[in-house]
Image (cartoon, grey):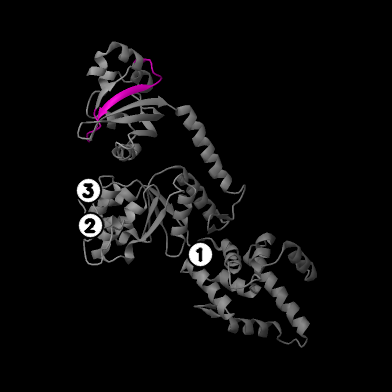
């Protein structure tokens, strides 16, 4: 190689603070020259890197596809590039490096070589990552959190969810979110995206169960103009739209076996081809999937490919059912009441209705609770499958005034019973009782004193 034969140039490159290199613009990015700086940077002598597999050996596995995609965009109009990624030293240590380089073109205008310089930025990147992590932690309030992004809840179950979301936001691993329908799986996925380094790019939600089998390939991979009747222009698919951002596959268990094979190639970075196109495309995105089904059972029954299962099932996040976090119901009620945009004044809900909602099992989870609140705001009455609010109100008042003629006395009796019931429901925790009844702590204390409840 002529770079090595030039002694002065070799000495100059060898004294640079890092590793200078030249590689072929082939599939493996084969290194054909490396400076002496390779030894101090990654622990390999230059001769150890002059091989086809060197790129795979030294570049971190999670960064390889992204680097290749960036290098494939080198053109005569834009020959220079800059990358930041991780490398693996001969001792197995990860380092952050900055790679700056330029494409060298052949007489036909094709990129023939890539010349670059790697410099160690591990210290700088470590500080940067620490600041990012601290920023993410600060986005969640100190102490017990009542919400994270659009997720609402102060229960232990939700605190665990918040903690895991914050950890997931720091990484780029694939996530599988499980839980019953209506538990907020898409909200959790969006929170991971919003708190991550990909937040400036798109969050692309896809309801896999709503796409007909014959349209899956078109929707995910896109199509070229003129491919079929009505295709008046090129249309990007979901994989292209999610480039640099997050692709969220809801109801991922509904994807057919046949399409799983094709989609897996796109998810693994091998590439995909738009319908009617010829070129192979890659797209860099973070994958988050969600399901309310047992994916392991689907694999056992032959309904899901094992390799597809392992591609999406990397880090699990389970959303708790609402019946498992009943202490969050008052917070959710208040949240949805305040979210009513049709009213200037926040709507209130009588305490006895709140108690009824607290006792209900909510098989439809948060989605069902929101729908019940929406109906209450529209119709002015609460309806659950097991109780009609108006009947409940009449029945409760009839019990309260049994044998009593005075209306103030009847109301006092009813209020006493209501507060006692709420206290028992909340295990005599006054803060939770006040929240359940929709009262301030001062008002609750005053009423406890009035009714001599200790």
Whichever of labels 1 and 2 marks the residue nearer the N terminus, that label is: 2
Badge number at residue 279: 3
Label 1, label 3: how many angstroms apart (C-alpha)?
A: 51 Å
Q: Few, some or many C-alpha atoms within 10 Å of disc 3 (few <14, some 14-19, many ≥20)? A: few
Of badges 1 and 2, nearer the viewer stands: 2
Q: Which residues are magenta?
A: 14-30
Identify the residue at image location x=60%, y=69%.
337
Q: For the C terminus, give its image quadrant.
A: bottom right
Whichever of labels 1 and 3 marks the residue nearer the N terminus, that label is: 3
Of badges 1 and 3, nearer the viewer stands: 3
Is residue 309 visible in the rendered structure shown here?
yes
Task: Find disc 1 in the rendering and name its residue.
Answer: 323
Locate residue 450: give its quadrant. Answer: bottom right
- Compared to residue 149, the image places residue 27 above or below, namely above
Task: Find disc 2 in the rendering and name its residue.
Answer: 275
Locate residue 212: give its quadrant. Answer: bottom left
């Amino acid at each position: 190689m002529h770079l090595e034969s030039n002694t002065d140039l070799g000495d100059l490159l060898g004294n640079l603070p890092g590793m200078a290199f030249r590689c072929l613009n082939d599939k493996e990015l084969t290194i054909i020259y490396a400076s002496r700086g390779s030894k101090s940077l990654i622990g390999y002598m230059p001769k150890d890197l002059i091989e086809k597999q060197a790129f795979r050996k030294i570049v971190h596995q999670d960064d390889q596809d992204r680097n290749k995609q960036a290098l494939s965009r080198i053109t005569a109009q834009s020959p220079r590039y800059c990358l930041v990624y991780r490398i693996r030293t001969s001792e197995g240590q990860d380092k952050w490096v900055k790679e700056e380089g330029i494409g060298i073109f052949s007489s036909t205008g094709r990129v023939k070589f890539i010349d670059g310089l790697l410099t160690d930025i591990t210290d700088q990147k470590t500080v940067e990552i620490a600041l990012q992590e601290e920023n993410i932690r600060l986005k969640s309030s100190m102490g017990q959190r009542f919400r994270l992004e659009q997720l609402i809840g102060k229960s232990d179950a939700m605190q665990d969810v918040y903690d895991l979301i914050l950890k997931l936001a720091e990484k780029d691993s694939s996530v599988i979110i499980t839980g019953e329908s209506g538990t907020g799986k898409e909200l959790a996925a969006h929170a991971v995206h919003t708190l991550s380094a990909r937040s400036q790019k798109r969050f692309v939600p896809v309801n896999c169960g709503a796409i007909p089998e014959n349209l899956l390939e078109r929707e995910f991979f896109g199509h070229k103009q003129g491919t079929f009747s009505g295709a008046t222009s090129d249309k990007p698919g979901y994989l292209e739209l999610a480039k640099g951002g997050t692709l969220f596959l809801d109801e991922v268990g509904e994807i057919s076996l046949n399409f799983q094979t094709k989609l897996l190639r796109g998810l693994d970075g091998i590439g995909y081809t738009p319908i009617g196109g010829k070129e192979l495309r890659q797209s860099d995105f973070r994958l988050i999937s969600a399901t309310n089904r047992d994916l392991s059972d689907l694999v056992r029954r032959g309904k899901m490919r094992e390799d597809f299962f392992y591609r999406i099932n990397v880090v699990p996040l389970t959303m708790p059912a609402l019946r498992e976090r009943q202490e969050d119901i008052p917070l959710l009620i208040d949240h949805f009441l305040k979210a009513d945009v049709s009213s200037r004044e926040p709507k209130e809900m009588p305490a006895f209705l709140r108690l009824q909602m607290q006792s209900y099992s909510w098989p439809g989870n948060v989605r069902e609770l929101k729908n019940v609140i929406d109906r209450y705001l529209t119709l002015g009455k609460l309806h659950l499958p097991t109780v009609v609010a108006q009947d409940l109100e009449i029945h409760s008042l009839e019990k309260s005034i049994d044998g009593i003629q005075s209306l103030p006395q009847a109301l006092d009796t009813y209020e006493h019973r209501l507060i006692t019931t709420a206290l028992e429901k909340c295990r005599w925790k006054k803060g939770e009782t006040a929240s359940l009844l929709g009262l301030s702590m001062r008002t609750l204390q005053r009423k406890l004193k009035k009714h001599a409840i200790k």
